[in-house]
Amino acid sequence: MSGDAIGVVIRARNEAEWLGSCLQAVTLQDYPSVEIVLVDNGSTDDTRAVAERYGCRIVDYGDREFNYSRAINIGIDATDAPLIAILSGHCVPANETWASSLAENLRDPGCVAVYGRQEPLPDSSPFDKRDLWTTFGVERRVQRRDFYFNNANSMIRRSAWEDLPFNESIHGLEDQDWAKKVLRTGHRIVYEPRASVFHHHGINHDQSEERADRHVHIIDLIRQDLT
C-alpha cells in the first residue's frame, strides 16, 4: 500500500455475532484505500469465515496468553499502511465517513493520534448507555496533556508506532499508556466525535470488578510522575 492508505487492525476472538456488521461498515467507507487486518486469537466460532468473506488479511495470534498490546503490534506489523485505524470487532462504524473523519485530523503534523466517539445501541444496558454518553461527548477536543485514548475506535500514524510500539508488559489500557508517552514528545491527540461507532457492550464490560481492579492498577502506574 502507498500514499495515505489506511490499515484497519481489528482484534478478535469469537466475534462472529458482530464482525459482519463491523466489516460491512468498513468496506462501505468513502475513503479510497483501506486494507483490513484481522488478528484472530483462536476463535472457535465463525469469526474467520466472516473475515474471509470480506477479504481480510487474517493474522494468527499464537501466544498462549493474550495481550492487547501484542495483538495490536502484530496487526500493525502485517500492513505497511502509513495510517493505522484500530477497531474492536464488536464496534460498528456509524457512517461512511468514519475513516475519513479520523484521517482528516492527521493532516496536522503535530497530531499523531485521534480517537472517535462510541455510542450505545437501543438495547444496550443502562450502565453502558450512561458510561458511553458521559465519556464521549459531541465536541471535538485537542489533548496536549490529557492521556485518555481508546483503541476500540482510533487511528495513529504508523511512524509514531514505529518510534513507540504499544507496551506489551501491561495487560489492558495500552492505549492510555501509549498516549501519555506520545504527548510527552510534544505531540497532540484529538478526540473526533464525527468518527462514531456503535459499541454494543460499552466500555466497562458489565461492571466487571476483576477488570476494574486490573485497570485501576494500570492507571495508577500510568499516573505516576504526571506533572
Image: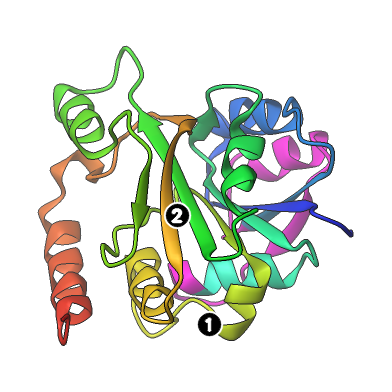
Q: Is residue 47 above or below residue 17?
A: below
The three-letter amino acid code for the residue at tag 2 is: Asn
Residue 28 visible in the current orientation: yes
Q: Residue at x 86, y 57 (%)?
A: 3
The three-letter amino acid code for the residue at tag 1 is: Leu
Can you identify the residue that label 1 sits on? 164
- Cα–Cα gap, marks 2 and 1: 15 Å
Q: Residue at x 16, y 76 (%)?
A: 223
Q: In front here: 12 or 148?
A: 148
In the rendered image, residue 89, in percent from the top left (x then y), is placed at 54, 42
Tell me if mark 2 has few (under 14), some (14-19) or many (20+) residues whose alpha carbon lies within 10 angstroms of its own.
many
Can you identify the residue that label 2 sits on? 151
Q: Quadrant of the N terminus?
A: bottom right
Instruction: Describe the element under mark 2 as helix, strand or loop.
Output: loop
In the rendered image, residue 8, in percent from the top left (x then y), is placed at 67, 50
Q: In the image, 225: left or right of 169?
A: left
Q: In front here: 74 or 166?
A: 166
Query: Which one is closest to the eye, mark 2 or mark 1?
Result: 1
Q: Earlier in the sequence, mark 2 or mark 1?
A: 2
Instruction: Give the residues drawn in magenta, as a range.
Output: 40-69
In the rendered image, residue 144, in percent from the top left (x then y), is placed at 33, 64
Q: Residue at x 84, y 43 (%)?
A: 33
Check residue 57 for magenta coloring.
Answer: yes
